[in-house]
Amino acid sequence: EAQVTQNPRYLITVTGKKLTVTCSQNMNHEYMSWYRQDPGLGLRQIYYSMNVEVTDKGDVPEGYKVSRKEKRNFPLILESPSPNQTSLYFCASKGLRYNEQFFGPGTRLTVL
Amino acid sequence: AQKITQTQPGMFVQEKEAVTLDCTYDTSDQSYGLFWYKQPSSGEMIFLIYQGSYDEQNATEGRYSLNFQKARKSANLVISASQLGDSAMYFCAMREGLIYNQGGKLIFGQGTELSVKP
């Protein structure tokens, strides 16, 4: 089954404790993105990658890092999480010639 | 300025009736794409329908149709014969520029919460 997976689905952590949210897709897609969803703001792009070792900032990159060492994986790293990073996070992937973005199930992060 | 505006925070519709969810957009690009996604209470994002800026016909997918009025920069979603399972948050989104622009980045509206009454 074609899908984007994310782990963990839920995470409660404390300020300053480094964490990684993993994302993997099995569709051989070139493009991958991370979005965060906040009430009243819709989803906003954090980072994106157009291929292995090619990443760039989206609209709200502060406080986040990403890497793309393999085509299928695109982890999101919060080196020193803060309460304003409490949000619902989505990973998405898209094929080169296709319009539709496929979204993962979401990761609900709470930073205390 | 907001690039995607959804002016209806919440809407109610009677089961089996049609409903229109409004979306207006703002871009200076000639090439762009418009999307609608559904987010049920379980949280996942479900793709519903796509309209390209050069598509002359309105997009349709089953009970969903996109009423594309380019001159007015609107891309309203029409759901025909509403069902209880249509109760969800609905997001309008836009991809500015070409298909690979910023990894296909989508700009989302604030969403419209649709409730279908039995």
Image: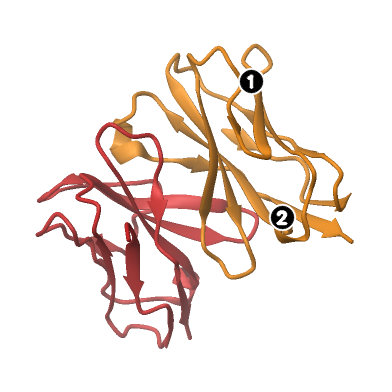
Chain colours: A red, B orange
Name the residue type under label 1: Lys
**Local crowd at mark 2 within 10 Å, few (<14), some, or many (≥20)?**
some
Name the residue type under label 2: Asp
A10 horizontally vs A71: left or right? right
The residues bearing labels 1 and 2 have C-alpha atoms spaced at a distance of 25 Å
Instruction: Residue at 28%, 66% (x, y): give it.
Output: A23
Q: Residue B86 bears which disc, if any?
A: 2
Report whether residue A12 is seen: yes
Q: Nearer the viewer, residue A81 or A107?
A: A107
Label 2 residue SS:
helix
Q: Is residue B1 visible?
A: no
In the rendered image, residue A65, in percent from the top left (x then y), is placed at 24, 62
Q: Return the mark for residue B73.
A: 1
Quadrant position of the N terminus of chain A in the picture: bottom left
Image position, residue A48 (x, y; %): 28, 48
Mark 1 on the same chain as mark 2: yes
Q: Quadrant of residue A8?
A: bottom left
The location of residue B28, given as percent across then percent down, is 49, 17
Q: Quadrant of residue A34?
A: bottom left
